[in-house]
Image (cartoon, helix red, strand yellow):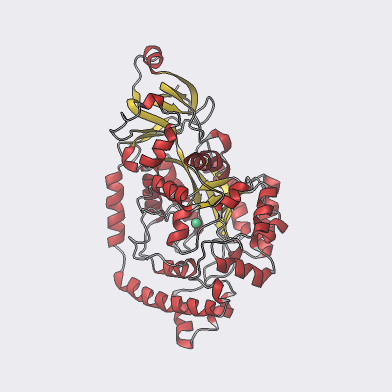
Amino acid sequence: MQRLILAGDHVVEDYSGRSRSNAAVVIENERVADIIPIEDARRVFPGDEIVGGPGHIVIPGLIDAHQHGRGVSNIQRGVADGPLEEWLVRLRGLWPMDTYLTTAVAALRLLRSGVTTAMHHFASTGVVPFEDELMASLQAYRDLGIRVTFTLDFRDRFSYVYADDDEFLATLPLDLFARIREKLPPRTASDPDRVMALLPVLERDWGGTRTKFALGPQGPEWSSDGALKQISEFAHSNNLPLHTHVLETRLQRESSIRHHGVSPITRLERLGLLGEQTSLAHMVWPSPDDLDRIRDSGTVIVHNPASNLRLKSGIAPVLEMLRRNIPVAVGMDGTSMSDQADFFQDLRLCEGLHFDRAGSIASDDIWHMVYRNGGKATFWGDAIGRLEKGSWGDAVVVKLSDDRLVEPIEQQTNILRRVLREGSPAMVHAVSVGGRIVMKDRRSTTIDDADLLDRVDAYARSADSADIKDRRKLVEQLEIAVRGFYSSWTTEAGPRAYNLISIQ
Ligand SMILES: [Zn+2]
């Protein structure tokens, strides 16, 4: 039997900050078997190593409810932030990177930040076969030992803007049209049939106690009604969860109304895609009616505070969501305030962003969002985000700063408040996923992280820089064309329009 013992001055049991002093978590066969006094752990398991101990705190592993496995950052790959619709085009000028390597770096950074479960919203690049990319990502997560909910993406329309490709390309000058068609062709559609055929195979070969699968359309903008209907029926008949991007920008709201006459939320509802088995990333621009529908259906929202600022989308009305009792989780979207994926920093941002005359988000709300709602959003439920008998043994051993004597740590009623204020990857001492230590003192215990970074470097150096330079020139022209395309849309919905008050 595999056993792991983690101990500290405090062991936090759940999002409320409820904790036991001078305690040890005993994890057996991947799950929490018991929480007992440290002295008892030493006595009952005399030969076992105890990770942590005095001066440490054990908390449940953090849950990043939305990201894309982009560990080698876009900045490292030469692409700066910008308004989403322009940025998506700009991504076509990314310096090439191997899928396995970038996913492995993402997992490494997440673990360093104390994240033990990640929602991976897979977005195929179209550069290598879809299946190969999927397997490479899955292999990286398996090698790093992180828990993941892995979505299978598809999109069947709108490669450049929220309009048919031919319609958009026809607006370009002839010479640009020809070069775009040749060098930056429409993205190959990945169809629902392919996804549905692949899922049972992936479940068989890659599923297990640490990996879960979900359906992951890129977003309603990029999917026809026919494709979404097909996915909806498949999800219902196979009891499969679904995760997607919705209402990240105002242009997306505008696009849905132009193409379908309704908000994307009404559209998803009509297609049978709302419910407790659905989590929606972003939701920066919902109407009150959208939020009511989300609440009534039991759908979960994933808030990405840093990404929504970096990509100029705006600030999601999280207080309005919480007041309706909608479960809201938190994600980094691979675009956190720090490209080191410092989740603590994003959580502090989340706490600070949301306030009005009637109230604000408190640190206790943040942990509820991370743990309780993070479990819902990633479809692991209460089996993660807490340390109680029977839950998965996902935990982080942290060391707070040295000034802990100001108020004796034993007397502090909710130690999670201090973890929120002081947290950083530097204080993450050890990380357990399912009772296996996968990170210790910032080093992976499952792979050689120095070698991984060397491989990233070698891969990057092997790229053809002349070719990328040419491509980027073309991408710049495409960006200008995209900006021009949206200029005919209402100005308030333009890609640069952002408004802190999204409900009007
Ligand atoms: Zn995303």
Pick whichever, 451 or 376, lies toward us.
Answer: 376
143 to the left or right of 259 = left
Please report the residue visible at 27 percent of the width from the left and 57 percent of the height from the top.
Answer: 458
The image shows residue 155 at horizontal and vertical percentages of 57, 63
438 to the left or right of 284 = left
Q: Quadrant of residue 440?
A: top left
Q: Quadrant of residue 90?
A: bottom left
The image shows residue 33 at horizontal and vertical percentages of 49, 22
> Residue farthest to the right?
270
Please report the residue visible at 38 percent of the width from the left and 74 percent of the height from the top.
Answer: 471
Q: Is residue 127 above or below residue 371?
A: below
The image shows residue 227 at horizontal and vertical percentages of 65, 61
Task: Determine if residue 444 is in view.
Answer: no
392 to the left or right of 23 = right
Q: Is residue 497 above or below residue 438?
A: below
Task: Determine if residue 13 is in view.
Answer: yes
Query: In the picture, which quadrant includes the N terminus?
Result: top left
> Residue farthest to the front?
357
Count up the numbered dots.
0
Query: In the picture, which quadrant includes the C terminus?
Result: bottom right
Q: Is residue 164 above or below residue 62?
A: below
> Residue farthest to the top?
43
The image shows residue 414 at horizontal and vertical percentages of 45, 31
Please report the residue visible at 28 percent of the width from the left and 47 percent of the height from the top.
Answer: 451
Please report the residue visible at 49 percent of the width from the left and 53 percent of the height from the top.
Answer: 304
